[in-house]
Image (cartoon, grey):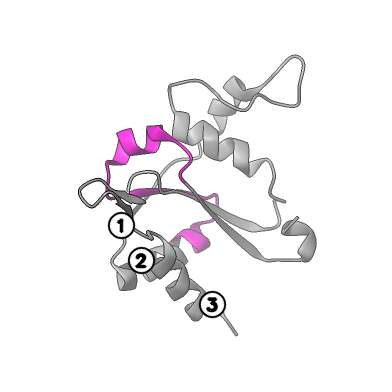
Amino acid sequence: YACNQGVDKIIDLATLTGACVVALGPSIAGIFTPSDELAKEVAAASEISGEKFWRMPLEESYWESMKSGVADMVNTGGRQGGSITAALFLKQFVDEKVQWMHIDMAGPVWNDKKRAATGFGVSTLVEWVLKNSS
């Protein structure tokens, strides 16, 4: 839908996979994007906000595990590389002309000690929007 509205860039945030928590722990979110430019923009915004992100690979060969004999694709690629296959799944719904980033914030979105949501990602995205608004 957003692509049909003529946007240039899309950033989605989701507590998508426990696999990203296993990979990066409770305080770092994984970012997935084919766009080096968008990755640099968000990294610069996160430097200001103090939120921690780590760019993860979008390994296209993992897409093989998402293929289906009866459907367009399966909605999960199995246990190994779970955060990557989840990002590859989302990527299928974004026009290639649109710069896109998926942020898997499953780890830092929740504070176990306080038993409360953290609001993770909001500060970085506010900084990013302010920097990129005209």
Q: Please give the range of residues in magenta.
A: 15-39
Q: Is residue 23 left or right of residue 36?
A: left
At x 38%, y 61%, the residue is: 119
Query: Quick check: marks 2 and 1 in contact, CB under 8 Å?
Result: yes
Q: Are marks 3 and 2 in contact (CB under 8 Å)?
A: no
Q: Which residue is mark 3?
A: 132
| Residue 123 vertical position relative to residue 117 in the rendered view, above or below | below
- What residue is rendered at 36% in x and 51% in y? 109
How busy is the neighbourhood of tag 3: few (under 14 within 10 Å), some, or many (20 plus)? few
Question: Mark 2 belongs to which amino acid?
Answer: Ser
The one of 71 and 56 positioned closer to us in this rendering: 71
Residue 107: image location, x then y, percent: 34, 44
Pointer 2 residue: 46
Is 42 placed above or below 12 here?
below
Instruction: Give the secondary structure at mark 1.
Output: loop
Q: What number is the disc on residue 96?
A: none
Indicate the position of residue 88 as horizontal and vertical percent values.
58, 37
Residue lying at the far top in this picture: please name it: 69
**Vertical placement of 131 versus 56: above or below?**
below
Judged from this view, the residue extending furthest toward the bottom is 134
Instruction: Identify which amino acid the numbered label 3 is placed on.
Output: Asn
Helix, strand or loop at mark 2: helix
**Identity of the amino acid at label 1?**
Lys
Residue marked by disc 1? 52
The residue furthest left is 113
